[in-house]
Amino acid sequence: MTRSAVCRKGPRMENIDDIIKRIFRESIQIKEVFLRDNLDRITRVVDVITEALKKGNKILLFGNGGSAADAQHIAGEFVNRFLIERPPLPAIALTTDTSVLTSIGNDYDFAEVFSKQIRALGQEGDIAWGFSTSGGSVNVIRALEAAKKMGLVTIGFTGRDGGTVGMISDYHLNVPSNVTPRVQEVHIVVSHAICELVDWRLFQRPDHR
């Protein structure tokens, strides 16, 4: 038997269409699993953020890499607007000031780039919202630890098994996947849902209770 005949009888290789379909199916499946397991937790996160904003507190968001982009994205949705016209809401991404980030990283350690900002900007009752697809990002962990000591409410968005970020967060939303893109896709969908529901609670149904 020729080599070409053996190859023709082997398993069919994925083509580009197969890969695209697989990516979408994986993303849909992990979103469905997450929603099934976390609906009540999402509602509680919406409640705690809404109450903090009602009291005049702010949201501090942080993460690394793609999670830094998510932090900045969601801060922008709160400060500018999401879907409705409403007053700007106080949110700060701790990932954007290059002078602060590089001075802390250079003079101290990259592990401190968020915790020092929490200590500088955070106040009791504020929200400290950390993103970590691994659940083990040291700078996110230290920021959440600093926030808890100061009386901030801590929210952790994680992947994998949640790691230390999940264990120390007051409110933990975990995507049970080891595939970073799939985790990030769920994080942004959930964050968008939270933005929409906070707006709804504050401005479209202010007397819902």
Image: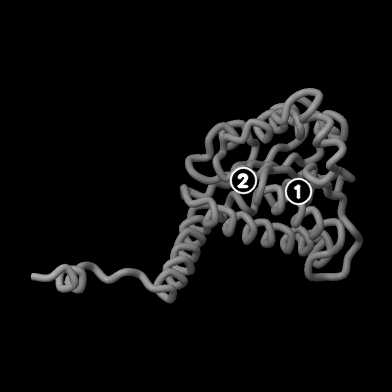
Label 2 belongs to which residue?
157
Relative side of 28 to 71, left or right: left
Name the residue: 84% across, 31% down: 103
Q: Is residue 187 above or below residue 4?
A: above
Seen from this angle, which residue lies furthest front? Answer: 2
Q: Is residue 68 above or below residue 29?
A: above
Q: Secondary structure at mark 1?
A: helix
N-terminal of the pair, mark 2 or mark 1, is 1
Q: Nearer the viewer, mark 2 or mark 1?
A: 2
The image's mark for residue 4 is none
| Mark 2 crowd level (few <14, some 14–19, many ≥20, 10 Å Cα) | many
Q: Secondary structure at mark 2?
A: strand
Task: Mark 2 and mark 1 in contact? Answer it, CB < 8 Å.
Answer: no
| Mark 1 crowd level (few <14, some 14–19, many ≥20, 10 Å Cα) | many
Of residues 91 and 202, the one drawn nearer to the viewer in this rendering = 91
Give percent across and percent down for residue 192.
69, 61
Residue 77: quarter of image: bottom right
Give percent across and percent down for residue 116.
81, 29
| Amino acid under disc 1 | Ile
Name the residue: 75% across, 45% down: 61
Q: Give me the C-alpha separation between circle 2 and circle 1.
A: 14 Å
Give percent across and percent down for residue 188.
64, 58
Of residues 172 and 6, the one drawn nearer to the viewer in this rendering = 6
Relative side of 170 to 36, left or right: right
The image's mark for residue 49 is 1
